[in-house]
């Protein structure tokens, strides 16, 4: 990747990445919605062991990619919490 030559270019690249991240998060949300159908109760949705597995993988991938593992962990924990809330709401709507 070429180094940006201006703040405007940095911001433009960030905006483009944000667009891609939103698209990927929408895809992740669809998978979360699909997973909700397989889970019987709130404990299955919260799945703390699975959360820790995901975090461990993300930290390792982050280190390999040159992303600070603590940044990756903070982002993923926030994202996972938001998706758990989303999934719990789907469970409530379905009467589970």
Image (tube, helix red, strand yellow):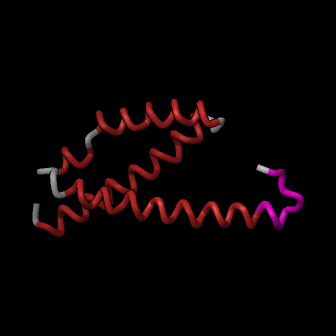
Q: State the residue at coordinates (45%, 60%).
A: 25
Q: Number of labelled discs? A: 0
Q: Give how far across and how far down residue 57 sits, in percent.
A: 44, 33
61 vs 79, left or right, is right
As displayed, is residue 3 above or below residue 57? Answer: below
Q: State the residue at coordinates (23%, 49%).
A: 45
Q: Quadrant of residue 56?
A: top left
In magenta stretch: residue 77: no
Q: Give how far across and how far down residue 80 sits, in percent.
A: 39, 49
In magenta stretch: residue 8: yes
Magenta region: 2-10
3 vs 92, left or right, is right
As displayed, is residue 71 above or below residue 25? Answer: above
Q: State the residue at coordinates (47%, 59%).
A: 24
Q: Nearer the viewer, residue 4 or 39?
A: 4
90 vs 71, left or right, is left
As displayed, is residue 47 above or below residue 78? Answer: above
Q: Give how far across and how far down residue 36 sits, in percent.
A: 21, 56
Q: Quadrant of residue 89?
A: bottom left
Tell me the quarter of the image containing the C terminus: bottom left
């Amino acid at each position: 990747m070429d180094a940006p030559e201006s703040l405007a270019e940095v911001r433009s690249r960030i905006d483009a990445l944000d667009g891609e991240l939103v698209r990927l998060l929408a895809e992740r949300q669809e998978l979360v919605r699909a997973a909700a159908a397989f889970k019987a109760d709130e404990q299955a949705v919260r799945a703390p062991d699975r959360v820790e597995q995901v975090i461990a993988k993300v930290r390792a991938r982050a280190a390999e990619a040159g992303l600070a593992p603590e940044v990756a962990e903070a982002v993923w924990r926030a994202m996972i919490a938001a998706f758990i809330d989303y999934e719990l709401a789907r469970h409530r709507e379905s009467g589970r």
